[in-house]
Image: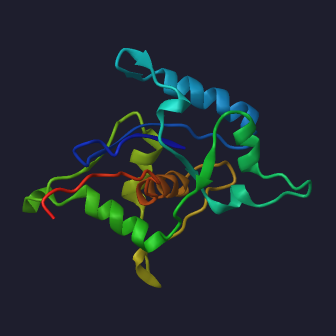
Amino acid sequence: MATSIGPMADGNMCIVDEHAERLWLPQRHVPAVKAMLARHRIANSQLTIADLKRFVAGADVFSKQSDGSTVASQYGKLGISLRCANTDRVNGWAEILHRLGDPGNGVAPRLFIHERCARLVECLPSLQHDPNRPEDVLKVDVDEDGVGGDDAADCFRYLVATKSRAISQRKLRGL
């Protein structure tokens, strides 16, 4: 899980924190996410779930379980309303590349990752192009001990690729 403060008014997106644990239930994740958010301050107050524009997750958390519930509904009961992420891999990675810019050629980055995001920072350089689909990244699963894999990168891609549902209304003049 990544926490983003952005996109900001200047179009930049800053990834400032992450939370990832294996084999935890939502009842354990939610307090950990709240504690992670509380480490951050906006306008001299602690950041809360209500301050975030969206929480996105892969489609699997919306699949019905045998009792008819979903993992997403379990999070919802605990105060985190999830919505389905844009999981389009090719366009998601393209958006990340676009936001990373090309500083060597005068294209400033608009995506920044804090060093606190250790899993993501460790994962990104190890990503490889998929030889069967070069515009995509090769999928890598964690090992038996939960080490490695590209879960942090997928979470990052979900966050960057999923646009806000906010609708802005502006009054036009001079037409």
Closer to the camera in the image, 33 or 70 = 70
Who's the residue at 85% across and 57% down the image?
65
Horizontal placement of 50 versus 79: left or right?
A: left
Q: Give the total of numbered labels.
A: 0
Residues 2 and 142: in front is 2
Q: Left of 77 or right of it: where is 103?
A: left
Whether residue 172 is situated above or below residue 10 in the rendered picture? below
Q: Indicate the position of residue 148 as horizontal and vertical percent values.
A: 55, 53
The answer to whether 128 is drawn above or below residue 145 in the figure is below
Q: In x, y percent, where is residue 18?
A: 49, 38
> 158 or 142: which is nearer to us?
158
On screen, 2 above or below 163? above
Q: Is the N terminus in the top left, top right, bottom left or bottom right quadrant?
A: top right
Q: Position of residue 112 (x, y in %)?
A: 29, 44
Question: Where residue 104 sits in the image (x, y, percent)?
Answer: 10, 59
Report which quarter residue 116 is drawn in. Answer: top left
Q: Residue furthest top?
A: 44
Q: Is 42 positioned to the left or the right of 100 in the image?
A: right
At a point 69% along the width and 54% down the height, the residue shown is 144
The quadrant of the image that shows the C terminus is: bottom left
Residue drawn at the location 64% of the way across and 49% of the way down: 146
Task: Report the residue that reaches farthest toward the left.
Answer: 106
Q: Which colour assignment does the render follow? A: rainbow
Q: Measuring 46% from the left and 58% from the top, which residue is drawn there? A: 162
- Seen as rendered, the residue at the extreme right is 67
Q: Is residue 52 visible?
A: yes
Report whether residue 129 is seen: no
Residue closest to the far bottom: 132
